[in-house]
Amino acid sequence: MSDDQLQKTGTVLVIGATGYVGSRLVPMLLSEGVRVRAAGRSLEKLATRSWATNPMVELHQLDLKDLESTRQAVEGCDVVYYLMHSMNPESKDFAQADKLAAGNMVKVGEENGLCQLIYLGGLGEDEANLSKHLRSRAEVAEILRGAKFPVTILRAAMIIGSGSASFEILRYLTDRLPVMVTPRWVSTTSQPIAIRNVLHYLLKALRLGETFDRTFDIGGPEVLTYRQLMETYAREAGLPVPIIVPVPVFTPRLSSYWINFVTPVPAYIARPLAEGLRNPAVCRESKITEIIPQDLLTCAAAIKIAIDRIQHHKVESHWTDAGRMPPVEWFSSSDPQWAGGAVFSDVRRVTIEGTAADAWKAVARIGGTTGWYYANWLWRLRGLLDFLWGGIGLRLGRRDPDELRTGDAVDFWRVKSAEREKRLLLIAEMKLPGEAALEFQIKQTGENRTEILQIARFLPSGLLGLAYWFAVSPLHEFIFTGMLSGVAKASQREILEKTRKSSLQEQTLQLKAVQQGEVS
């Protein structure tokens, strides 16, 4: 494909621009001089991407289930990358929602006279006995094929790359289990492909007439079983090759719980992935290799690159990036009797002899391998209880040990806002009888004097929520004081004013200041 072809006038809409593949595709398009409209469910997440301020990119909030929202996103675009599908089989209507979204896309695309739509689907969708998730993806592909504009469908098996859910499952299983009893699907064959090869196909298929109204299987140069993949990973990671004992009693549901227990990937994501592994995912044709030639990485080479990127903290996108950002209007309210119900607060402050940059360096490293600066055993216990209660526990960790951006997972919290050297707002994703948030506000009050304000708030749900808050309140004196003191010590600057809890009157004034963006 010529450079002229890539640079044709017309904006390219990338749906799913905050997802694992979309986050990496957008900068590649921009580097080729393509004007991009990056669409996702959260403008906050989109705004944190490194390419968000590029003059060739436009950020757009999109709900594909809403016809008018889809119209607004597609208007003025001539090509669409359709990089979204549900990964939550626990939702009873996820298949219907996906069909509705695909139908809206076809309707709006026809109204606007799209030149092309490119969809990334999955291999194995035409096998017998499909899982509900794979069947849904096949239905989406069929709806898109029926459009009156050109559609290009690329179907991939497991994508190997740092941060992908499939690779994280492979990595953690092999890292943590030198001996494992496994489901029968470890003997099912698949044809994995490196993320960089997937991105190359997606990029080069853009406005390429030879790909119009065609479906292509894309895969790497090898067909392997999952067992062989684990053995390959072990060799590349310098680990002993695991001893693997397949047994017939593991159902997909049991497999998902097993994966959920051993890896950071929750059962609702692990289950569709595990169900998909029972079907062979091997390319049935290879026409794409003639139309878009490239050097295909072996599984060993792709795994080696992924391991290197993880070790050097260069993970561009992560499976935890996906998902809707929860609203937290109740948190920013300074009214202790907010319209949504009583909100309980715990406000503490500390002052250090240092700059806002010194304070931020410590705040931004919270969670993950750094821990929570105080009583980490209690946080681990809370994570264990959350896991036993059906939550995610502490196992999500962090995408990067030093850097935070909106949408990142931090153990069982989600970053709602990360303003460098100013503010970090975390929303709890743990199982709770209510909603919880934790915020750090940083303000440099002098040439070498900085205040750190820590605000924990809880919106209880019913009597159980009230009982929960009053039951754990005695622990807050130790945990919250210790955590903020730990943050101050981690700044490696002298503490001028020790951590103290604000009075109710001070809290009210401080929360109003926070609401107005004026911490004092």
Image (spheres, rainbow, N blue to C red):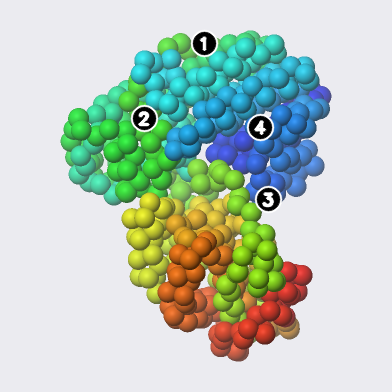
> Label 4 crowding class (10 Å Cα cut-off): few <14, some 14-19, many 20+?
many
Task: Give the mark nearest the N terminus, 1 or 3.
Answer: 3
Which residue position holds label 4? Answer: 64
Q: Earlier in the sequence, mark 2 or mark 3?
A: 3
Viewer-proximal residue, 508 or 186? 508
Crowd around label 3: few <14 · some 14–19 · many ≥20 (10 Å)? some
Which residue is painted at 30% across and 24% down in the image?
188
Instruction: For label 2, count other residues whose C-alpha is less than 10 Å away and answer few (under 14), some (14-19) or many (20+).
Output: many
Q: Which residue is mark 2?
A: 275
Amino acid on which the number 1 mark rests in the picture: Lys
Residue type at numbered disc 4? Leu
Q: CA distance from mark 2 to mark 4?
A: 26 Å
Q: How many marks?
A: 4
State if disc 3 and disc 2 touch (CB < 8 Å). Answer: no
Residue 296, above or below 242 = above
User: On the rendered structure, is 233 left or right of 73?
Assistant: left
Which image quarter is the N terminus in?
Answer: top right
Q: Quadrant of residue 76?
A: top right
Residue 190 location (% of width, % of height): 36, 24
> What residue is drawn where x is 54% and y is 27%?
96
Instruction: Specify which label sits upstream in the sequence, 2 or 4.
Output: 4
The residue singled out by tag 3 in the image is: 44
Which sits in the foreground, 66 or 387?
66
For label 1, the residue is 287
Residue 287's place in the image compared with 19, above or below, is above
